[in-house]
Each structure stands twice: as C-alpha cells, then as structure tokens.
Amino acid sequence: MTEALIPNGINDSGGTLSYFRKGCNPLAQTGRSKLQKKRAVLNQQIIKQMRIRAGAENLLKATSNNKVKEMVLLELSFVNSDLQLLMGQLDALNSSVDVYQSKQETVNIPLIALGLKETKEVDFSAPFKDFIMEHYNEDSRKFEDEIADLMDLREACRTPSRSEAGVELLEKYYNHLPMIESRFFAPTNQTGIFFTWYDSFTGVPVCQQNLSLEKASILFNMAALFSQIGTRSNRQTTAGLEEAISSFQKASGILNYLKETFTHTPSFDMGPAMLSMLIRLMLAQAQECLFEKSVLPGTRNKFNAMIKVAQEAAKVAEVYDQVHQCMIQTQLKDNVPLFWSTMTQVKTNHYCSMAHYFVAVALLDHQLGPKDDEDHQEKTFSQVYDQFPEGWTPLDVLKQTELRRRLGKAHIRKSTSGHEEALRIFDMCPNLNNHDVLRDILKTSHYHSLDKYTEFENEEEFTDYMEAPNILSKTERKAEMETPSTSKVKVKDFFHRLGPLTVFSAKQHWTPPRTVRLCPEGRDLGFTLKGGSPVQVVSLDPLCVAAKDGLKEGDYIVAVGDTECKWMGMTQVMRLLKDVDEEGIDIQVVSMLDANPSMPAKSATFSGNLPKTYSMICLAHDDEDKNPKTRKVAKKSSFLSWGLKNKVKSTSTVSLPTADYSGSLPWNKHPPSFPSSSAYNSES
C-alpha cells in the first residue's frame, strides 16, 4: 500500500491488530457511524421500492386487461405508501442533530450538520487492466497493486473520520480523480465503470459513467464533514467557536464551488436551488457562532454595549430568516427536512426577540447622565432603526424619561411575544420535542422578557399599545465563504509508471512499442532528440541504420536496452546512448496514431555532383537557444580519414545544422511535439 496504515485497536479473529487508512475508521461504533449505516440501509430499501414501482408502471402502460390494471394500481398504492414511509425515516435521520453535537454542549442551541452521501463500491480492476493492456500496451499484472491502492482509497472515503484527517482523506481522493480521468477516461470511449451515489435528502440513486458525479459527490461530502466538525466544536470556549466558524465558512465555500463548477449534476441535493439554500444555512450558523463568541465573555450592562449586542442578534435573525425563505420555496419545501425548516423559524424568532430585549434593557436600565457622552449615544441610537416613531428624534428619546420608558416597554412586549411564538413553533414540530436544551433556552429567554416587563409594569398604562420599530442588523464581523485549498494535499500519481501524464493519457493513441536497433557509424546515430520526458526523435536521417530498422521522426523513446526511460530527460538518454559500441543497442519507441504532423518529404540534395546526406550525430535539440550561429557540431575524424576512400566520404557529407530555425532547409523543420512534462508532487 502506498498510504500509511494505522492500527484501529481492534483485534480480529486471528488475534492481531487490523489496520485502516489514516483518516478513516470503518469499524468505529459511534452515533454518527450508526446513523450513516441506517442511511445506507434506507437507500437500498428505497431503490428496491423504486424498481418495483417502475416495473409496475411499465406493466400498466403495456397491458390492456382491466383486471390486470386494477391489480397493478393496487400494487402501486402499496409501493407509494412504502416509499413515503421510507422517505419519512430518511427525513428523521436528517433531523438527528444530537449525534453531531459536542459532548460539552450544555447551554448552546443545536446546530445542523449535513449527512454524508452514500455510494456503492466500485471495482476498477477489470476495466483498468483491460485499458492498460489495450491502450498503453503494458502488462496489466504489473499494476495490480496500484489499482488496489486506488480502490482502497475510495473505500476509505466512504467512512471518513470527523476530523481534519478525514477531510484530508477526501481531498487526497479528489486530487487523484483528475489524474485517473486523464489516464483512463477517454472522451470518445466509455470504460464501463458506473459510479452510483444516493441523494442525501431523497435517497434516490444517481448513476453515471463519467467522473463528474464522483468529483461533485466527494466535494459535497467534504462540505458535509466540515459542517459536522463545526457542530462538534466546543462552543463554550473561544477556540471551539473559532473552529466552528471556520468549519462552517469552509463548508459554504466548498458548496459554492460545487454550485459554480458542476452545474448539471442530476442529483437533487446538488441542484442549484438546494446548494444555494445550504450555502446560506452554513453562513447563518457561522454568523450565530460569531454572535456567541461576542457574548461569551459576558456583556457589560452599558447603553452602547447593549445596543451593539442587539444589532448583532438582529443580524443572526436576519440571516436565518433568509434561510427559512429559501427552504419554503416550491422546489425545496417537499424534500427539506421539516426539522430544518422549523429550526430556522425558531431561531429567527428567538434572535429577533433577543435583539428587542437588549434594546429594551438599554432604554429602561440606563438614563442619560451628565457624565455620559451624549453625542456618542445619540449617534449609536440613531443607527438602531430604519425609521423612528413619528415626531420622535434619537436625542428626545435619550433625554426624556417617559419616551424612553414607553419605547423600552414596546420592545420588551415584542420580545415576549416573539419568544412565545418561538415556543409555539417548537411545540408544533414532533422532531423538536426531544431537544430539551433548546426548550430550556427558549423558556429561559421568555422568562427574562416577562420578568423585565413585570419590573416596569403599570396598570395605568395598559392602554399604551405602541409598536416597537424594527431593529436594523449590524455586525462587526460578517460570516463569509472560505474555500479551502485542496492543492495543499500533495498526491503522487498511482500510475506514475505509465509515463508522463501530458503524453501518456487516454486522449492519445499509440502504436505498440517497437524495437529498433541502433548501430552507430563512428559516433553517429542518425537523429537528434528534443523535448523533456520522454524524449522525441527529430531530424532523422532516412539513410541511417535506425531509420531502415523502422525508426520514424516524432517517435518517443520509451526504453534504451533494459532501461525504461519514459521519465528521463535528454541528458539522461544521451548518457545511455553515447557509449553504444559497434554492436549497437536495442531501443523501444512508440508512435502517436492520431497525430498527423505536416512533415515535408525528405530527399538527398546535390552539390557539385556529390550527394549530400544528413549528419548522423545524435544531438540534444535545445528549443530555448535563439542564436543559431552559436550552435556548432564538432566531429572528430579518425586517422583513417586521411585516406582516399575516407576523403571522398568526408567531402560528401555535411554537418546537420540542428540549431537552424530559419526554416530555409526543409529537413530542419521539426514536427510538433508535446510540451515537457513535469513530475507530480510527492505526497506529504
């Protein structure tokens, strides 16, 4: 295995420790893992009922027998009833927020976490082996370990741990997918591999052969895992609240990237409307944590401090109201869990009531004294409402006790009625009845509002029904989307041995490797090289031994002797070729089938009635050299060249000007080649 494995601490039947991949623990028996197993079982039951329904509907269309139609309609009614029950159970699982909350939670309102999408196991073995053998002409048995590693990584992603290690595990698989797609998923051919993912809200399976669904679903699960980390954070500490804020902002950032990038995903939970709602939900929960952080140390009972807290609470109410409006849209309301919709409605009323309560406290408990900064209070108070009661000014309210009292009591009445509405909504939702913490928080808030109202109650003022103005929301720190960088998790291509991905990909078609014998004449091999890994043959002498043995211009050298050189550069290949003796050496080359470079016809030219051929010195071709005059070919003549026979040979040959970019000579035009490839970063 290429990934580090760690013991899970559970002995198997043989008495030895079993192991799992870092960031994954499929044997963990937590409330969250049990909930996911229930979700997987429900998904299987839902797909079974949907198949039965599809068969019954097809039979209903095909038959003309009235008796058969009656029986099929009866069967359909039972199937639809079963589907509704299963959907209700799935809705209840999505409403189970307790298993995601922190163990230290005692006084905080529960937060909503997304459940992980479930998927079926995928067997890459047979399709990938066939593709490696047919497309890359490699022995597929040599890549069994790599295929097993890939399948193991995907299987581990089905049960990620609720931690940074779990997120990193999903990021690793996500970063592998583009490389896997380039290696094995050709645009024109189907691999026969089907990826099945279940909708997290409806349980309906979606199946595709391309990797778009796989990538989108992994991103969704990354966002879901961040939301679960956020709900798990200890919100009784500043560090825990910061972790929750960051997690929810990252979840919203991933969901937004998913929405903008994968625009045609045929799954309801990843549709544009649903993703927009989920993004708002994550940001609303981040804003709620920001509010909790601001009041965690306590709030001074001062006028300006009370007004500031009130507007922060109004901001939380505002964002939750926006989430609720999204949830009750026609295309969403039937599939969004009722618990979610009710919870956002409860929080909207709760935080709005808190905002009115804090404004009431600021007005009723504090009078403008001679030592107070009148201008500062007036400026602060003038920004609380969008419109003051008719005929009133901020300074009038601050200076006149009666006006402060009337306005303060109007706010406390609105706070009390808002908490009563939150409790009413809470009692109407059956899934909320088990949340004692939330009920206690709502009741306590309602009690404080009643207590404050009783403190200033006056029977002579029972006819004062002044309506409190709406409070403008304002925050010092707004929750914003934060897209985590998946590039921080470095991965190494599982199928690195197939060669550089820029060349050896599913888009390119190659001939099987051919063996060519190189027999140098002197030190001449008859061609030049260019490019990075692998090197490419250019400027081939058609009369050299290698060309006669089948070497072609544009061929890529994949092996020299017994040494594989797909990843070797020019310097390394030249080192292997420079010491070739007179007996020669075998090289393996491949040709691209779908590349049709415009190669000019090559023929010998004549000068002084003597045929001129090409130099057979194997030179590295440097594309970056822009000065052709500085390139010279140095040939060392042996002492035999002074003889008559060799004299004729030396005058009938010219050195190949490999650096001539002028294009004046037709044999100096090089075929188009791939850019140099770069190695993938190693795993951290």
Image (cartoon, rainbow, N blue to C red):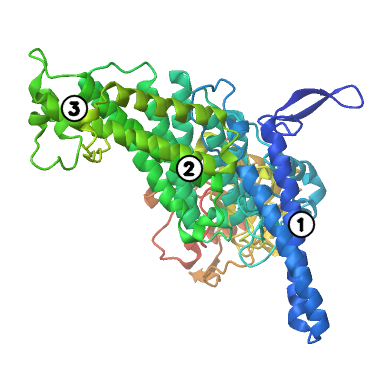
Tell me the number on the disc at residue 405.
3
Tell me the number on the disc at residue 211.
none
Which SS class for mark 1? Answer: helix
Q: Nearer the viewer, residue 139 or 662?
A: 139
Are circles 1 and 2 on residues that touch, CB within 8 Å?
A: no
Q: Position of residue 445 (x, y in %)?
A: 41, 27
- Which picture quadrant has residue 187? bottom right
Q: Which residue lies under the disc numbered 1?
A: 127
Looking at the rendered image, the quarter that the N terminus falls into is top right
Q: Which residue lies under the disc numbered 2?
A: 425
Q: CA distance from mark 2 to mark 3?
A: 30 Å
Q: Nearer the viewer, mark 1 or mark 2?
A: 2
Crowding at dot 2, Cα within 10 Å, few <14 / some 14-19 / many 20+, comes out as some
| Mark 2 vs 3, N-terminal side | 3
Looking at the rendered image, the quarter that the C terminus falls into is top right
| Mark 3 vs 1, N-terminal side | 1
Q: Nearer the viewer, mark 2 or mark 3?
A: 3
Q: Residue at x 46, y 50 (%)?
A: 277
